[in-house]
Amino acid sequence: MESSGDVVVAVSEGVLLLDVAGPAQVFHWAGYRVRFASPDGSDVCTDVGVPLGVSGAVGDLTGAADTLLVPGYAPEYPIPADLVASVRAAAPGARRVASVCTGALVLAEAGLLDGRRATTHWLACDLLAQQFPEVDVDPDAICVRDGSVITSAGVTAGIDLALALVEEDHGVELARSLAKHLVVFLRRPGGQSQFSVRASIGMPRSSGLRKVVDSVVEDLAADHSLAAMATRAALSERHLSRLFRQETGMTPAQYVKQVRVQAAQALLETSDELMAAIARHSGFGSEETMRRTFVEVLGTTPSDYRGRFRASAL
């Protein structure tokens, strides 16, 4: 296939292998010229120990680059300062700049996300928002485009990103063909919430609030209105709402909704129960209420969720 453009993947020591390999495979099959570059032109080693040869230094390869792509790094690897500097210097010469996973932190450190909407791996969204308050972080998005800068969620979302750019450049038919070849969705249903919701529910420090949340988990179908929970906690509704905000970052109603969604997710993944039974056991009362809540919280339906995450024997 005739070359579709020049993609330069900016890498440094410890780069996540799948962040590199997924998008590179998509672009290669789509006919792009894919080259790897490091800050000083030296070969690097990925996070799993696989050596990665590079074609040169970032600054030497990006003069006519169509796309500058920055993969991510595991938490134990600090953001490489030399990579940040080289990406900052090279970005103006590229038609567009994109990141995969925590590569968004590299872009943010380089000042390329200032005043822009962006996303990253759901586990790093809070970190991105805290360290770079000038970035408008969307924790649920799989891919976000803001002008010439595109960011994507974690790891395999790099494939989603690459397919979106192929579609932008060459149309939906080529992108759809590649998605079929890769056995992935062209546009995956839902957002990152379907993966992250369980991690967002923590255990409160306050004993009064712990008593309330324990009662929610113990009987999901019970009355968990603000008034009922305040009575159980022997607190005023106002005080209880304030405690929920302080210790969970959610309102009482949002907390109950998240716990019920979590319970339904577990049942959808592991049981053969009918949707109506799962809705009752999860405290939703009806299948329709569960469906509406899933769409609101996860961006997908219970049946679609079960189809993607249901455990099955190979």
Image (cartoon, rainbow, N blue to C red):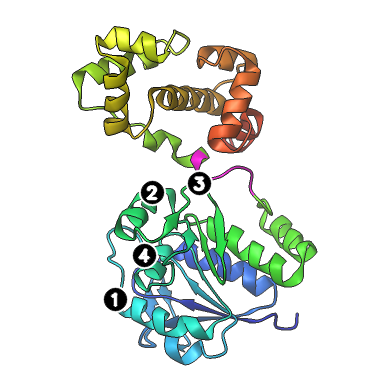
What x and y, as percent, mark residue 128?
36, 57
| Mark 1 or mark 4: whose residue is earlier in sequence | 4
Numbered tag placed on residue 123 in the rendering: 2
Direction from residue 76 to residue 50 in the image, left or right: right
Q: Is residue 261 magenta?
A: no
| Mark 4 or mark 3: whose residue is earlier in sequence | 4
The disc labelled 2 sits on which kind of residue? Leu
The magenta segment is 188-193
The residue carrying pointer 2 sits among few (fewer than 14), some (14 to 19) or many (20 or more) residues within 10 Å by Cα, namely some
Q: Residue at x 31, y 12 (%)?
A: 230
Direction right: furthest residue = 173
Secondary element at tag 3: loop
Direction from residue 183 to residue 18 in the image, left or right: left
| Mark 3 or mark 1: whose residue is earlier in sequence | 1
Which circle, 3 or 1, is nearer the viewer?
A: 3
The disc labelled 3 sits on which kind of residue? Asp
Numbered tag placed on residue 47 in the rendering: 4
How far separated are the C-alphas under marks 2 and 1?
A: 22 Å
How far separated are the C-alphas under marks 3 and 1?
A: 28 Å
